[in-house]
């Protein structure tokens, strides 16, 4: 799923150039960013979030565009550069979870420098873990100028005022020096304790020392109750639905809604989409969205039942995405075929188009092998044999993935012959009838198929290269 990039939030120099409204906008946009980094919201959604005065929205977005943290795609949507994808195999601290406190009224009221301070601590250590540093390094001063971490605070009083505000509003918790006590929004006399710790008495603070040993170490963390697991804004939350916003918007256009479905139903759709993205990247998301639009144009009446039965994700995958993937494969074959007929008249021949086609087709055929029904596999194999036989043969001879695809096809034929006594033509007939992948298929049911002989000749003409015999 998409998260806030830790590396982006660590860029204090760039954050300093942004206004408070732009800073507040970052987590909101991140929470509504899809797998391909498309921000699935419109201006009215930002207005409804009550992050800023509506007249400032375009200016806030403009500043984020100026520093290239967001950009406008050819489709008219905004895209994010400050999101990153979390994966199970990446164990580094490379992202920040999107927490519920980003949606709170208190967060939306924070000033610019408080937001910078919050982002600094949030990206310094794992959320809820302490970041330890000398309090003397948290504001501008000549004595420790080279070690200043937050140069936007102009004095101790300036820094401590904002620190107190962040603690009192529940964002920060602190610990002083070697003390075990955690100071938080419920701590009494908090201001006096911080001033005493920093040795600021009366109107004058004790003279600052360049000796690190004499510095006052403070340990700051994001309040643990804000970053616990249950405080992460789930992608299936109706206030977010980051990876399902495209489905939500398209469904709405056809009088359908996601509001009535539980997390389990939504999760199944997300997992299908995430798998497509993992295999094909942005191209996969494009195919997925095209499939969604096609489904709702033709079968919006079936949406609710499919969602309630948990079948919607697989329906989109099997009947709307995979056919598009197959069409892409055929286009690659067509390019090689055209190249062959225009440039050479003998095989073997490996043109540049042939090499590109092998490379470009591998993720498609791998996905099809793993996700397609046996019916689809048999039909695709027969189509490739019929129209691109020589090219198809070469693919299976020079590339391991294509070789494995052909081996899988032959295994299906072999299993059908052994289990049901079906020859290759009967297997193809069953694939056309969408019967190979049925969960329950007995020998007697197949033998009782009265339509087989009558329709055999008509169906087998689907492939003009197959000889037909009675």
Image (cartoon, rainbow, N blue to C red):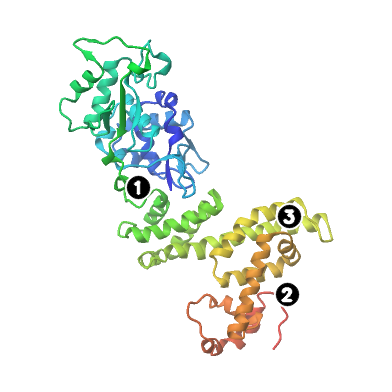
Q: CA distance from mark 2 to mark 3?
A: 23 Å
Q: Which mark is residue 465?
A: 2
Up/down of 189 relative to 351, above or below: above
161 horizontally vs 289: left or right? left
Q: Nearer the viewer, residue 103 or 222?
A: 222
Label 2 vs 3, first from the N-terminus: 3
Residue at point 26%, 16% (across, down) = 157
Q: CA distance from mark 1 to mark 2?
A: 53 Å
Label 1 vs 2, first from the N-terminus: 1
Q: Which mark is residue 66?
A: none
Q: Residues within 10 Å of mark 2 (few under 14, many from 20)?
A: some
Q: Residues within 10 Å of mark 1 (few under 14, many from 20)?
A: some
Label 1 vs 3, first from the N-terminus: 1
Residue matched to label 3 = 354
Up/down of 95 relative to 59, above or below: below
Q: Are marks 1 and 2 in contact (CB under 8 Å)?
A: no
Residue matched to label 1 = 240
Up/down of 40 relative to 120, above or below: below
- SS category of the residue bearing label 3: helix
């Amino acid at each position: 799923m998409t998260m806030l990039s830790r590396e982006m939030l660590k860029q204090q120099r760039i954050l300093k150039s942004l206004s408070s409204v732009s800073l507040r906008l970052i987590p909101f946009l991140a929470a509504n960013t899809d797998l391909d980094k498309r921000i699935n919201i419109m201006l009215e959604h930002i207005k409804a979030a009550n992050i800023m005065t509506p007249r400032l929205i375009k200016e806030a977005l403009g500043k984020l565009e100026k520093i290239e943290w967001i950009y406008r795609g050819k489709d008219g949507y905004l895209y994010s550069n400050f999101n990153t994808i979390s994966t199970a195999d990446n164990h580094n601290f490379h992202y920040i979870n999107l927490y519920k406190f980003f949606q709170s009224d208190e967060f939306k009221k924070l000033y610019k420098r408080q937001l910078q301070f919050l982002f600094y601590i949030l990206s310094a250590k794992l959320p809820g873990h302490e970041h330890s540093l000398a309090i003397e390094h948290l504001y501008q001063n000549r004595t420790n100028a080279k070690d200043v971490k937050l140069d936007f605070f102009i004095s101790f009083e300036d820094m401590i005022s904002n620190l107190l505000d962040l603690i009192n509003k529940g964002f920060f918790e602190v610990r002083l020096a070697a003390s075990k006590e955690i100071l938080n929004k419920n701590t009494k006399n908090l201001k006096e304790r911080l001033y005493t710790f920093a040795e600021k008495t009366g109107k004058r603070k004790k003279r600052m020392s360049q000796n690190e040993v004499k510095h006052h170490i403070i340990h700051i963390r994001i309040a643990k109750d804000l970053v616990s697991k249950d405080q992460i804004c789930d992608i299936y939350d109706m206030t977010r639905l980051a990876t399902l916003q495209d489905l939500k918007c398209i469904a709405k256009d056809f009088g359908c809604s996601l509001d009535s479905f539980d997390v389990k139903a939504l999760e199944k759709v997300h997992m299908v989409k995430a798998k497509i993205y993992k295999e094909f990247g942005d191209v996969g998301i494009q195919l997925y969205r095209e499939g969604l639009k096609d489904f709702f144009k033709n079968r919006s009446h079936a949406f609710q039942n499919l969602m309630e039965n948990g079948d919607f994700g697989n329906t989109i995958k099997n009947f709307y995405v995979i056919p598009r993937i197959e069409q892409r494969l055929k286009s690659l074959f067509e390019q090689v075929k055209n190249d062959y007929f225009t440039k050479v008249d003998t095989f073997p021949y490996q043109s540049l188009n042939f090499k590109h086609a092998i490379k470009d087709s591998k993720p498609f055929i791998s996905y099809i092998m793993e996700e397609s029904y046996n019916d689809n596999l048999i039909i695709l194999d027969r189509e490739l044999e019929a129209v691109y036989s020589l090219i198809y043969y070469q693919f299976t001879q020079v590339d391991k993935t294509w070789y494995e695809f052909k081996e899988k096809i032959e295994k299906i034929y072999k299993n059908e012959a052994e289990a049901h006594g079906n020859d290759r033509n009967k297997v193809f007939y069953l694939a056309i009838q969408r019967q190979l992948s049925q969960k329950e298929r007995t020998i007697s049911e197949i033998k009782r198929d009265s339509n087989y002989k009558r329709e055999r000749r008509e169906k087998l003409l689907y492939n003009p290269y197959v000889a037909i015999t009675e």
